[in-house]
Amino acid sequence: MIVVNQDKEMKLRALLIKIGISANIKGFRYILDAIEILEKQQIHTNMTTVYELVGEKQNTTRSAVERAIRHAINQAYTNKKMLKEIYYSKPDNSALLYDLVFNFDVFKNIRIQENNKKEVLVEPEILEDLIAAGVLLEKVDD
């Protein structure tokens, strides 16, 4: 059994892992930062501006941010069937980011626990990603 922390960022981290975005790549962190920026804006923001703000926060260039996010999406779309079930074709950066922020219902069939702490069974293939993303609070052996 695994005990997970279910605050908003932890739910988002778990969702990203579930859709196939690995926690050990830069794009994972950049997606979290971009979502934070978009949520604060509450309006349609030019993605170039978002990439620049993430780049400033992470001490990198906007093109490196865009490329890392694109790579994360490509990897998830290629290696996991979850995104293919949601999108007919590979989503671009802005489509996925805006859906994660403003159209979260697209992901409603992906179950994320809602209690503050909940014991859940975790698939072994995503266990390392959950640990790397900081989603796990503790591992409990059966």
Image: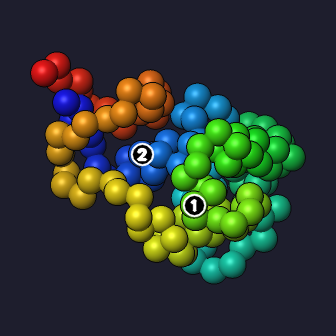
Looking at the image, the residue that sits furthest to the top is: 141
Answer few, some or many: residues within 10 Å of disc 1's Cα (few below 14, many 20 plus, some between 14 and 19). few
Query: What residue do we see at 82% from left, 61% from top?
Result: 48
Q: Is residue 69 above or below residue 46?
A: above
Q: Is residue 92 above or below residue 45?
A: above
The x and y percentages for residue 83 are 60, 55
Answer few, some or many: residues within 10 Å of disc 2's Cα (few below 14, many 20 plus, some between 14 and 19). many
Q: Is residue 57 left or right of residue 115?
A: right
Quadrant containing the C terminus in the rendered view: top left
Given residues 5 and 139, the one toward you in this image is 139
Which label lies toward us, 2 or 1? 1
Is residue 32 something one can see in this rendering?
no
Query: What residue do we see at 74% from left, 37% from top?
Result: 59
Q: Is residue 96 left or right of residue 65?
A: left
In what element is the residue under mark 2?
Answer: helix
Quadrant containing the N terminus in the rendered view: top left
Q: Which residue is mark 2?
A: 14
Residue 17's disc is: none
